[in-house]
Amino acid sequence: MASILGLSALFVCFPFFSSSPFRHSFTLSSCLQSRADIPSATTWDPPSSMTTGLDQVWARTLQENPNWSDDKNWIMDQLIANNGSINYCVRWNTAAHKSTASDRTKIEAGLQRSLKKWFDTLVGFDGFPLTTLAVKVVGYATKDKSMIEGDTSAIDVYTTVDADGVPECDPRCYRAAHLDGDLSGCPSGAAGRYDISLWLDESLEGQNAGYGYNWGEELAPDYVLDNLDTENIHILQHEMGHGFGLLDFYDWVPEGQTSFVMMAGSAMEVTEFDAWMLRDWWRRLKAVRRW
Ligand SMILES: [Zn+2]
């Protein structure tokens, strides 16, 4: 289990250590920069300052995940299968916070805003067929329904738990468990389908840390709730990057790079280097999947 550095920790342009797979700690750097303006691209033509680094990243990807294309549930797969629609289940595993209707609206908007930072880098690039992203939260899972306050008529509220006792939405509605597309067992029908989860877990309360993969993002409840109005919820963006297959960079740095969101703590938002790593995944996955 990783140790977690607090915000007051080291001020360098380089984060440290990792830990157990998929756990990501964030030591915020003093040299964070805004990189919001990412030039769009239509073909594989990264800036020359990035080409060596991108080659290194892909070589490392093959090392860390040699079966990279066998997994049919990357966020890219979800986007293509659903024509740009991504449905979320929120796993409310915290007794310290109640879910208000107002916060639920903001959580849905925050997921849309954050995933769109990644999505927009693909629009118009190398045959990527989508221009519109539609993120919707279709369900909340909780141990106690009274934690989900206000009008819940537009969502499914589940009180079932997984094998570890963590609330989860109905697996019969989870796309990854039904990659043949048959969700006929989902009690609320096609509208109840979810592709991915946002998991707020009390074990992470107070920590700048998270987990992410193509099942979703696990974050600290207070971090999410305190940042609902933040334009760039950078830990969420980072964990979403793992859902696309992107790596961590705790023990090495691609040549010429100092600041990008997948290098935890070195950037506060998706940067151009992150965009090119994602575009690299798109062109390679497109070829394998024959999209
Ligand atoms: Zn990470």
Image (spheres, grey):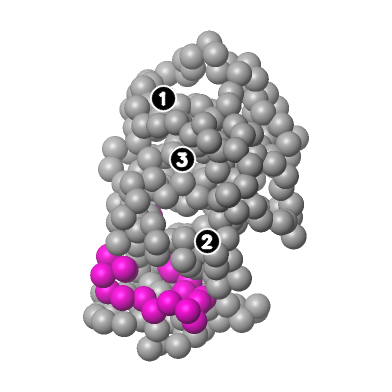
Quadrant, the C terminus:
top left
Q: Position of residue 95 (x, y in %)?
A: 49, 81
Residue 35 forms part of the magenta stretch = no
Sequence-wise, the earlier of marks 3 and 2 is 2
Position of residue 234 measured from the top left corner of the image (x, y, whole percent):
46, 46
Disc 2 + disc 1, Cβ < 8 Å: no
* Depth check, front residue: 247 or 136: 247
Can the viewer see residue 186? no
Numbered label attached to residue 126: 1
- Identify the residue at horizontal 47%, vertical 79% (top origin): 96
Q: Is residue 132 visible?
A: yes
Q: Secondary structure at mark 1?
A: loop
Mark 1 or mark 3: whose residue is earlier in sequence: 1
Check residue 219 in the rendering and tell me which mark sits there, or answer none: 2
Looking at this view, is 215 or 185 the one in front?
215
Q: Badge 3: how crowded within 10 Å, few (<14), some, or many (20+)?
A: many
Is 79 positioned to the left or the right of 101 in the image? right
The answer to whether residue 145 is left or right of residue 63 is: left
Q: Is residue 231 above or below residue 190?
A: above
Q: What amino acid is labelled 2 in the image? A: Leu
Q: Which residues are magenta?
A: 84-105
The three-letter code of the residue at mark 3 reads Met
Compute the Cα span from label 2 to label 1: 33 Å
> Quick one: 267 or 201, which is closer to the camera?
267
